[in-house]
Image: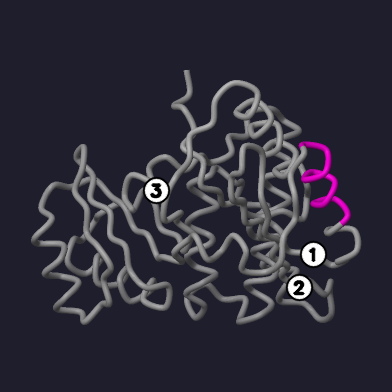
Amino acid sequence: MGRSFENRKHAIFKTAAQKSKLYSKYGTLLYVTAKSGVADPDANPALRNLIEKAKKDQVPAHVIDKAIQKAAGVGGEDFSTARYEGFGPGGSLVIVDCLTDNNQRTISEVRACFTKTGSKLAATGAAALSFDRQAVLSFKGDDEEKVLEAMLDADVNVTEVECKDGKITVFAAPDEFFKAKTALLAAFPGVELEVQEITFLPQTSVTLNGDDLAIFEKFLGMLNDCDDVQEVYHNVDLPAPA
């Protein structure tokens, strides 16, 4: 599981246009998270965690503040979640999570990404059955036993604790995310969580080469260019960046 997690590729936004898309996606997600709970990070753990993640991805404070202030107002857009699954280039498995205020627009854009790369949308569960939904927290460290002890003392339902290359990664049930995070911060004051998310981890990975790899990378790029797409999960073991 740990290796599969390490091989997952995160989108990297370098140009001004790409950063704008990143800010827009975070703005929408922050708005929805604040609107569905309360617009106060101290009273909304999910919002607090998302703000931390946004800051780590270098989202400006004014983008974060504007989204939260907007959610604190009356009315506003009506966003809903949408998840699409399918088979990508080379027989890869793909899950696409979206936030949208127009389902017809979103499915049209996502379907175009699949169609233009020879991929195929599938029924709900077709791809997700081959993934595990997990809470993942990772930080620098080497005392695996101490971390496991802290999790057990806090009665956290831990799936696995992995120590590799000077980093410790805790895998837990999704509904244990905040409990596990609280336990880690209490047991290791000052620890900096490099990864803190609930994600889909592939049960097995596939390696693509040649044209299949090139088309798959194009496919990922097209999906990430869709404003409504928030996360893309897949089971491809991508090569490390040059």
* Furthest-front residue in this view: 91
Q: Residue at x 47, y 74 (%)?
A: 45
Residue in front for this viewpoint, 203 or 157: 203
Secondary structure mostly taken by the magenta-highlighted segment of the chain: helix
Q: Label 2 is placed on what type of residue?
A: Ser
Relative placement, left or right, of 36 versus 118 is left
Vertical side of 30 occupied by 6: above or below:
above
Q: Label 3 is placed on what type of residue?
A: Phe
Answer whether labels 2 and 3 touch (C-beta < 8 Å).
Answer: no
Magenta span: 108-117
Pair 2/3: label in front = 3
Residue in front for this viewpoint, 14 or 88: 88
Cα separation, mark 2 vs mark 3, equals 27 Å
Cα separation, mark 1 vs mark 3, equals 27 Å
Vertical side of 81 occupied by 5: above or below:
above
Going from N to C along the chain, the mark reached first, 1 or 3, is 3
**Secondary element at tag 2:** strand
In the picture of the structure, the residue carrying the numbered disc 3 is 5
Going from N to C along the chain, the mark reached first, 2 or 3, is 3
Residue in front for this viewpoint, 192 or 175: 175
Q: Label 1 is placed on what type of residue?
A: Thr
**Secondary element at tag 1:** strand
In the picture of the structure, the residue carrying the numbered disc 1 is 100
**Secondary element at tag 3:** helix
Going from N to C along the chain, the mark reached first, 2 or 1, is 2
Disc number at residue 80? 2
The verdict on residue 148 being magenta is no
Relative placement, left or right, of 18 versus 144 is right
Answer whether labels 2 and 1 touch (C-beta < 8 Å).
Answer: yes
Quadrant assignment, res 154? bottom left
